[in-house]
Image (cartoon, rainbow, N blue to C red):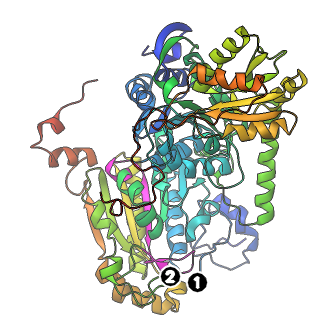
């Protein structure tokens, strides 16, 4: 696979994180800047091994902050570039993401999510939904967020993400999680593209060579009117993205009265629960957002037209995407939430139980606790006393 | 137009100012091509303007404007992307070395420089500075040290002197609480990736010429692939020091230069090495693993 520019489509068994790396290279990515963190580790390791073999650059930065700013520089210089991290590291990338958006610099940011807040844990989670879909950093901007649910989609979505980033001159995020990152599945890798064949970037800062005026990549506008204009122009691009690029998968939604909304790892569990509900005669369906931003509002409209009465947002967090479901449903259907957090995965049975509650006109049960529900003693989750006061 | 120019006007200058020259007038100095027509936003007596011009003159003399990409900082020189005629990128506060790294890795044959102040380079961007230097990024860094945050109105900088009064050290920098100034040239000269570090100033004609020589060398080093080069310019900030420009230069001589002595802190070529990598290899000559040759 050394001569990556020649690699043809092929079917292999690979780990999700490695597929992200391999498919990125096949998409023409030649520059990777990152900093070690679990559970995205294999992605960077794969890049370190493979990128130099095809004339690319892998650089382990001194920090996530430096890594994203290297991405900003390489992207501004016209390179097809990416970085990857996991939740705590992505927080550090928020500064650079905002500058990239403000200066219209394309690049791909991968977040293989783990539990939070703070250092959190290293098990799969979806608790960075708000952070991703509200665009990480400060200022008026969004970024496209693509959420793979299989290893195959890891390949497909990152392959497209680079084109989306270039076309709209925007940072673009792959929001995966530790489960899909760590699992192995058969995958058809896309054929490799030669970076030289990609569309030109006349705005890039690559040396004017005396042939044009100097290019400036910048996000500073001291005139409020000018800053407003640039933000408005950017939001016109966002409107186009919303119109053209909402994506989702619908399963048994044609006549569904109860629609489970779930993405990524949670959607794999929800899929089983919806199938089981159908087997029990419940008119359940699955709406799986593939783009989290833009959120697939048109699909929500469609399933409501088809007769959906209840939405159940199933997430690996305390309830984040449920807010977008509520906004999209706009009072036309009930919207409930069920989720597990901290790296705990719900079972299909747990989700099925909630679907049954909705089918019976009952309230959805509050999400079960982790260690507490399992009967073990928690140290002091809501104890506000100091360890001294507790006599420890 | 007048033909008795003291310097030969390049074509672009004829286009720019030719029509403004009256018969018999003499041009003694022409604006470098690498500077745009934009008017500097620097205060009177501030040395940023001089250093911007020196950088532009060096770019002109080396004939590299078309292949140069500059990275502007956050601070008083934040707008220098409008002043330099080469391609420019505006970086986040302190991140210029990381941004420059990204550019240089995409275009290794281009010339990439970062222009940064002391808060940018030596406080919020210390990590980026130290690591770009230790990686031996083949970039050129121009470091303006005026011992204060100028743009935000005169706060204590990492390089503010002991007992220096600023907005955020109103009783003078108390070293027992705020610590000591960072001496960047001394610090970076210890790093293996660094090829060249010199500290200069711009308080006199002689020093300005020396500063230009250092800046030009820092660019030439990059062109020759010798390694990371940084020129620290001990600079003035009359506005935030609360002094007239003349008093500011005197204060610089009296207080800044004894704390920040001028001179070359590292120059691998003068030390007899071809580049920073060769010097680093020699320094680690007793470390077997560091001496291993990479097999292709």
Say which chain tag 1 marks. Answer: B
Position of the N terminus of chain B by quadrant: bottom right
Q: Is residue B183 left or right of residue A187?
A: left
Looking at the image, is mark 2 or mark 1 nearer the viewer?
A: 2
Magenta-colored span:
B132-157
Q: Is residue A360 left or right of residue A341?
A: right
Q: Which quarter of the figure has residue B86? A: bottom right
Alpha-carbon span between mark 2 and mark 1: 9 Å
Between discs 2 and 1, the one toward the N terminus: 1
Q: Is residue A196 visible?
A: no
Say which chain tag 2 marks. Answer: B
Q: Residue B217: image x %, image y %?
A: 38, 59
Q: Which quarter of the figure has residue A174? A: top right
Whether pointer 2 and pointer 1 mark residues with C-beta atoms closer than 8 Å, the reply is no
Q: Which quarter of the figure has residue A319? A: top right
Question: Which residue carries the number 1 mark?
Answer: B44
The one nearer the camera, B60 or A379, is: A379
Residue at 55% over, 64% down:
B74
Q: Would residue B158 be counted in the magenta stretch?
A: no
The one nearer the camera, A354 or B206, is: A354
- Residue sitting farthest toward the left: B286
Position of the C terminus of chain B by quadrant: top left
Residue at 30% over, 53% down:
B195
Give the vertical position of A378 relative to B146 (above or below). Answer: above
Q: Residues within 10 Å of mark 2 (few under 14, many from 20)?
A: many
The one nearer the camera, B31 or A102, is: A102
The one nearer the camera, A66 or B91, is: A66
Badge number at residue B237: 2
Q: Would residue B151 be counted in the magenta stretch?
A: yes
What element does badge 2 sit on? loop
């Amino acid at each position: 696979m050394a001569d990556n520019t020649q690699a043809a489509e092929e079917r292999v068994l690979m780990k999700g994180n490695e597929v992200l790396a391999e498919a990125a290279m096949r998409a023409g990515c030649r520059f990777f800047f990152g900093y070690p963190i679990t559970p995205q580790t294999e992605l960077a390791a794969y890049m370190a091994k493979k990128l130099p073999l095809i004339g690319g650059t892998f650089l382990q930065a001194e920090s996530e902050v430096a890594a994203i700013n290297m991405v900003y520089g390489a992207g501004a210089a016209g390179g097809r570039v990416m970085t990857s991290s996991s939740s705590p590291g992505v927080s550090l990338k928020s500064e650079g993401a905002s500058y990239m958006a403000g200066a219209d610099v394309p690049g791909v940011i991968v977040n293989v999510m783990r539990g939070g807040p703070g250092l959190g844990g290293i098990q799969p989670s979806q608790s960075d939904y708000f952070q991703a879909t509200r665009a990480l950093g400060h200022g008026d901007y969004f970024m496209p967020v693509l959420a793979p649910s299989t290893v195959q989609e890891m390949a497909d979505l990152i392959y497209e993400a680079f084109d989306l980033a270039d076309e709209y001159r925007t940072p673009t995020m792959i929001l995966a999680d530790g489960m899909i990152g760590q699992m192995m599945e058969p995958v058809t890798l896309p054929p490799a593209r030669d970076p030289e064949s990609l569309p030109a970037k006349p705005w890039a800062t690559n040396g004017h060579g005396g042939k044009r005026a100097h290019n400036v990549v910048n996000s500073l506008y001291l005139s409020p009117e000018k800053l407003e204009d640039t933000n408005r122009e950017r939001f016109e691009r966002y409107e186009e993205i919303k119109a053209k690029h909402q994506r989702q998968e619908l399963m048994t939604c044609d006549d569904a009265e109860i629609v489970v909304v779930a993405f990524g790892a949670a959607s794999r569990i929800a899929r089983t629960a919806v199938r089981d509900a159908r087997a029990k005669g419940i008119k359940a369906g699955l709406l799986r957002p593939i783009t989290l931003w833009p959120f697939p509002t048109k699909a929500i409209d469609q399933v409501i037209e088809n007769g959906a009465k209840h939405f159940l947002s199933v997430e690996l967090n305390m309830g984040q995407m449920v807010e977008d479901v509520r906004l999209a449903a706009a009072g036309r259907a009930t919207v409930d939430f069920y989720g597990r957090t901290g790296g705990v995965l719900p079972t299909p049975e747990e989700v099925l139980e909630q679907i049954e509650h909705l089918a019976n006109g009952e309230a959805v049960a509050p999400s079960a606790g982790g260690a507490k529900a399992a009967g073990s003693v928690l140290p002091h989750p809501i104890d506000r006393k100091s360890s001294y006061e507790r006599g420890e | 137009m007048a033909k008795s120019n003291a310097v030969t006007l390049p074509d672009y200058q004829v286009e720019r100012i030719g029509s403004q020259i009256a018969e018999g007038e003499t041009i003694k100095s022409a604006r470098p091509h690498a500077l745009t027509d934009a008017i500097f936003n620097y205060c009177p007596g501030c040395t940023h303007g001089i250093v911007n011009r020196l950088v532009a003159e060096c770019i002109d003399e080396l004939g590299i404007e078309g292949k140069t990409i500059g990275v502007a900082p956050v601070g008083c020189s934040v707008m220098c992307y409008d002043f330099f005629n080469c391609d420019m990128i505006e970086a986040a506060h302190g991140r210029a070395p990381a941004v420059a790294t990204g550019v240089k890795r995409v275009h290794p044959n281009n010339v990439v420089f970062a222009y940064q102040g002391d808060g940018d380079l030596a406080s919020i961007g210390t990590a980026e500075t130290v690591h770009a230097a230790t990686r031996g990024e083949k970039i050129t860094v121009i470091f303006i040290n005026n011992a204060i945050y100028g743009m935000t109105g005169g706060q204590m900088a990492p390089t503010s002197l002991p007992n220096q009064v600023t907005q955020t050290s109103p009783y003078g920098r108390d070293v027992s609480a705020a610590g000591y100034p960072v001496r960047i040239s001394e610090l970076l000269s210890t790093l293996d990736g660094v090829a060249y570090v010199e500290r200069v100033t711009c308080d006199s004609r002689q020093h300005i010429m020396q500063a230009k020589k250092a800046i030009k060398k820092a660019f030439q080093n990059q062109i020759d692939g010798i390694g990371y080069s940084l020129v620290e310019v001990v600079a003035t900030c009359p506005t935030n020091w609360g002094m007239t420009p003349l008093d500011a230069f005197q204060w610089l001589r009296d207080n800044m230069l004894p704390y920040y002595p001028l001179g070359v802190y590292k120059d691998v070529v003068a030390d007899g090495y071809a580049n920073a990598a060769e010097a680093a290899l020699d320094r680690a000559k007793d470390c077997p693993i560091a001496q291993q040759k990479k097999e292709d």
